[in-house]
Amino acid sequence: MSNDTASARRKSARLSLQSGTIGAIVEWYEYTIYGLASALVFGHVFFPDLEPAIGQIVSLATFGVGFLARPIGAFVAGHLGDVIGRKSTLILTFSIMTVSTAAIGLLPGHAQIGIAAPLLLCVLRLAQGFAVGGEWGGAAIIAVENAPRERRGFFGSWPQIGVSAGLLLGTAVVSLVAWVSGDAFAEWGWRVPFLLSILLAAVGFYIRLRATESPAFLEEKARMEAEQEEQKAPLPVLFKHHRRSLLIAIFGRFAEAGNYYLFTTFVLSYVAVNLGVDSWVGLTASMVGAAANIVMIPIYGALSDRIGRRRTFLIGAALIIAVSAPTFLLVQSGEAWAIILGVLLFLGLGHGMVYAPMPALYCELFPTKVRYSGISVGYQMASILLASFTPALASAMVLWSDGSIWPVIAFAIVCTLIAAVAVWFAPDNRHLELNEIGQLPADRADAGRVPAAV
């Protein structure tokens, strides 16, 4: 390989890494500010005719509406990403997310347009969920497929910091605007973080437009053209020939999909409602844990390049199981330092270790022609099964058990065990080129294969 070719590939990998990471941060910033606004002001702005407590519940329910659209976004974006390309699809999902977020910032309230206001809010929230449904798979793929084979775990881990970085950035911006605008935050101040997303999106668009299309996708398209192979719709192929890999992708998320919202969203509510602790304590715990995730995730991604995706994931799952009880016991103490330490243990250790290798692990499960569909559908189906209702389920468990936290601990451990079993059966394809994966349909290729020693 000439020096010019090697330099071009390094530049392409760097731009793709930036594209996946920056895009993920912006999208999760936009997602975070919606969640905070729904908790703080949307009840007053869009549901003023309801009792304050009921308006708060309905306002938070609009946050959950976004989860309903995620699988649809995964199906559509997966199809487009496998047929027309990863880069174009990522630009599309980014555009939908940005326009929806900016529109929320400009949306008149109930006082101006009546019932149309909450209806339009729900429509825009569905659009946000649709965009996120296709974003994760694209960001993961564009980073992994452009990475050197021996560094796919490290490159793939960078878009994973988007959730934590978006949480930190969104929380910081909302807090700053609330402090500056004071009592006016509920009138107009809440709109500022939504409109600021336009500036962030401009940076994201610039980077994504400079990124190159995935070499694996281009090679697969060239091969199909050379062999005059007809382009098949990826979703039927996925469900017919790659069910095993899809099930691994769905259940492999059980260690982090529900547990992330359990140890963040639920903990925020639990310490405020059940323990009577100031809300800033739970918020600080989430931010400290998110910062730890940002630092540790790339380290764990690099570790997966050394010892394997499956081994890294299983160590992380074991850590989640080990820290689940201590974390909740620390939280239950009601002490600020203990709550922060508990959340930090979960996010910085176990969660980061199962989350970091996931993009490379999932990309190595599916062949190139169905990869976008496979990882998007698998990832978002788990979001519907767990992430969308876990905080509410955990709250119900505490209520049902007369305030005991042990059912919640048991739930976290069982979910993690399910994920560990699923990932145990994942093939170790990290030494293969991505276009060598899935030469046979996955169900037949993996049939009878015994997992290598962990």
Image (cartoon, grey):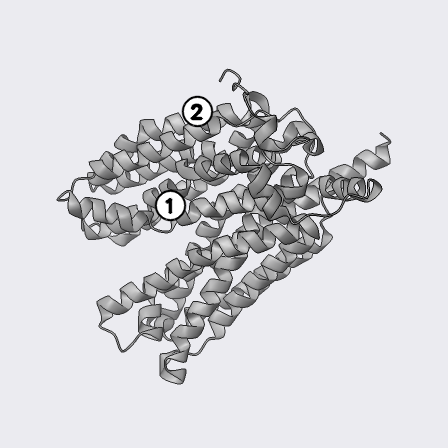
Percent across and percent down for residue 330 are: 24, 35
- Residue found 25% across the figure and 74% down from its top: 50
- Residue found 18% across the figure and 51% down from its top: 276
- Residue found 43% across the figure and 24% down from its top: 315
Q: Quadrant of residue 147?
A: top right
Farthest residue in the left direction? Answer: 402
Instruction: Specify few, some or many for label 1: CA neighbours under 10 Å numbering under 14, 14-19, or 20 or more.
Output: many
Position of residue 368 in the picture relative to residue 46 (left or right): right
Position of residue 357 in the picture relative to residue 183 (left or right): right
Percent across and percent down for residue 242 are: 57, 37
Percent across and percent down for residue 107 are: 46, 75
Q: Which mark is residue 170?
A: none
- Which kind of residue does numbered mark 2 sit on? Ile
- In the image, residue 160 sits, relative to residue 105, either above or below, namely above
Instruction: Specify few, some or many for label 2: CA neighbours under 10 Å numbering under 14, 14-19, or 20 or more.
Output: some
Tell me which label, 1 or 2, sits earlier in the chain: 2
Q: Is label 2 in a helix, a strand or a loop?
A: helix
CA gap, disc 1 and disc 2: 22 Å
Report the quarter where the N terminus lies: top right
Position of residue 224 in the picture relative to residue 56 (left or right): right
- Which kind of residue does numbered mark 1 sit on? Leu
The residue nearer to you, when weighing 301 against 252, is: 252
Position of residue 111 in the picture relative to residue 372 (left or right): left
Q: Which mark is residue 315?
A: 2
Q: Which residue is mark 1?
A: 386
